[in-house]
Every structure is written in C-alpha cells, then in structure tokens.
Image (cartoon, helix red, strand yellow):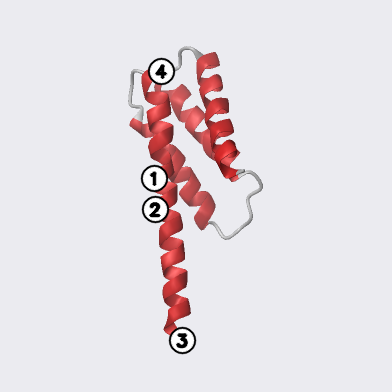
Amino acid sequence: MENIETYWAIANKTIAIINIIIEGWPVYRFVKPFMKGKTCCVGLSYSAAMLVFYLVPQEITYPYLLGILVAWTIMCLIEGQNIKQKVFLAISMYLIRWGFMV
C-alpha cells in the first residue's frame, strides 16, 4: 500500500504533462488561419515553454502570460508582417485561456 502514493504522484505528473502538451493544439488552431508559415511551431513553442515552466522547481508568477509571450515571439519570428494582428492574437489567446481557468 505504500506504493500507491508513488503511483498517484507519477500519474498526476503524467496527466499534467499530457495536458500541457494538448494545450498547444488550440493555440496552433487559433493561429493557423492568420499565418502562412509554420504555424505548428507556435503551438509547439507554447507547449515547450509551459513544460519548462511546469518542470522548473521554482515558482513562476505568471506562467501562462510568459507562455503566450513565447508564442507571440515565435509568431513574429516566423512571419514579421502585421505585428498588430499578432499582438491581438496573443492577447486573445491569453484571455481565452484565462477565461477557462476561472
């Protein structure tokens, strides 16, 4: 019975990591109609940043805002045109994510 806590901790961490990876897909789908280039990199960068923020043992104040900032930076690096649209997309993604958290 002592191993149940260990199994629960492993399952809990695994589910959280899978959830973070899956959260990159809506970011990718949200950005896809507005960009011509490699839009999958935006979702992957968001998931990678959120995984780093989750796995780093220090408390990060606003991890979702930083994740969206990473996605915005990748959007601007992939397609440097129409920065205002990308700012709007990043703010919209953050607000949608914030709305689901509440």
Mark positioned earlier in the residue sequence (4 or 1): 1
Q: In whole angstroms, how far apart are the C-alphas of marks 3 and 2?
A: 25 Å
On residue 22, the disc is 1
Looking at numbered disc 2 in the image, what kind of residue is underneath it?
Answer: Ile
Q: Report the residue marked by disc 3.
A: 2
Q: In whole angstroms, how far apart are the C-alphas of marks 4 and 2?
A: 27 Å
Expressed as whole percent of the image width and height from the top left, the position of residue 58 reads 61, 57
Q: Residues within 10 Å of mark 3 (few under 14, many from 20)?
A: few
Mark positioned earlier in the residue sequence (3 or 2): 3
Q: How crowded is mark 2: few (under 14 residues within 10 Å), some or many (20 or more)?
A: few
Q: Report the residue marked by disc 2.
A: 18
Expressed as whole percent of the image width and height from the top left, the position of residue 26 reads 41, 35
Q: Report the residue marked by disc 4.
A: 34
Residue at 58% across, 32% down: 95
SS at mark 3 in the image: loop
Cβ atoms under marks 4 and 2 closer than 8 Å? no
